Structure formats: structure tokens, C-alpha cells
Amino acid sequence: MSMRFTTKARRGVVALTVAAGLALGVAGCGGGGGDDNKKPDTSASATKDRNSDPSAQEGQADEPLAELRGSDGLLLQIVSAQRDAGGFVTVNATLKNDGAKSTVVPAALSGNETEIVRNGRSLGGATLVDSKGKKRYYVLRDTDGRPLTTTGFSTIKAGESLSVFMQFPAPPTDASEVTFQLPTFASGTIQISG
């Protein structure tokens, strides 16, 4: 009897482990990644979390690292700049429409590089500048030339906000303070953590 009980107990543990793994996998799929981010949002419902990276908002601080004003009432609040073990820095921010009417997000935010522009609206024009090391870091691209940043947005209604992220090559570890730049926005100094 103890042999049967042990076998049944093992099967139960395996079934429980598989069920837990499936539940976590399904929960991880709901964050909105992959190809869905390539489609422009014509409904202007910008309050949804549309990050391509499910962990993009991890490590947020209560107080933004920087608040940068752009055109037409747009405000970019940088909430974190985290150095990752893979050799890159992920900048998380909130893009908000502080204006009184809906705003079309300027195409200039994508930058002017042909490879990035042909992949649709993005924050591909963002850069980090290490003044001490005299280097500028551009948004990373995948093997198909798509920028590693939030994509697929076009209009933000008055008062709405959109969680966004951008990934850059990591500056040297002694360069913890960098200048963040995005076309049409004021620049701001931010601290890289990690």
C-alpha cells in the first residue's frame, strides 16, 4: 500500500507543478507583447499597458527621475533607468497628455533612421548621452531592425497616459549619470541604477 500511495502522491505533485506552470504561463501572456504592438491604436485608448517587455515597469520609483516637457502638452515622466546583466539599460517612463485635447504623437519621436521609421511609430529617436565618456547611446534594434521600445501608438486623449520603455546599450558602470534625449522634448539628466 505504501508503494501505491507514494506513486499517487508523486503523480499529484507532478500534476500540481504542471498546473502551476501553465497558470503562470497563461498569466504571463496577458501583458501585451509581440506583434500586437506594431498596430497603431486608432481608438486612442492610451491607458492600456502596451509594453513589449512584461517586466518593463519593474523597479519603479515613487518620484520620477525626470519630467520632460514636449510639444502639444505631452509630458514624459522617467520612472526608472535600470542596468541589466545582459549589457543593456532599460528606461521606463510614462508618456502623458497634459493638454486639453487629444494629441497626435509626433512622428519625430521615432527618429530619422530609415530602418526604424519603416517599422512604424516608436520612441526610436531616444538617446542616452554619457558626457564624461563622450558617447551617445541609441535605442537598440532587433535582428529585423525594429527598435526595442514601445511601438504602435499614434494619439493620446487629454489626461490619458501610456507606459513606455526603451532599451539602450549599457554605458560603462562608472557612468551612472546620463542625459536622456528624445526629439521634441526637453533633455534631462537621469541616474542609472543597478
Image: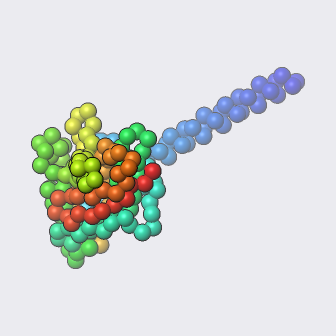
Residue at the outermost right position: 1
Front-most of 146 and 12? 146
Residue 116 in view in this figure: yes
Residue depicted at 28% across the width and 53% down the height: 132
* 105 relative to 134, above or below: below
Q: Nearer the viewer, residue 170 or 3?
A: 170
Residue 60: x and y in percent read 44, 60
Seen as rendered, the residue at the extreme front is 132
Outermost residue, top direction? Answer: 3
Q: Residue at x 23, y 63 (%)?
A: 187
Q: Residue drawn at (76%, 31%), measured in percent from left and top?
A: 9
Q: Give the farthest residue toward the bottom.
A: 100
Q: Is residue 40 visible?
A: no
The x, y position of residue 24, in whole percent, is 54, 43
| Residue at image location 88% in from the left, 24% down from the top | 1
Q: Position of residue 169 (x, y in %)?
A: 31, 43
Residue 161: x and y in percent read 32, 65
Quadrant position of residue 11: top right
Quarter-of-image position of residue 18: top right
Q: How is the image coloured?
A: rainbow
Q: Nearer the viewer, residue 49 or 183?
A: 183
Q: How many marks?
A: 0
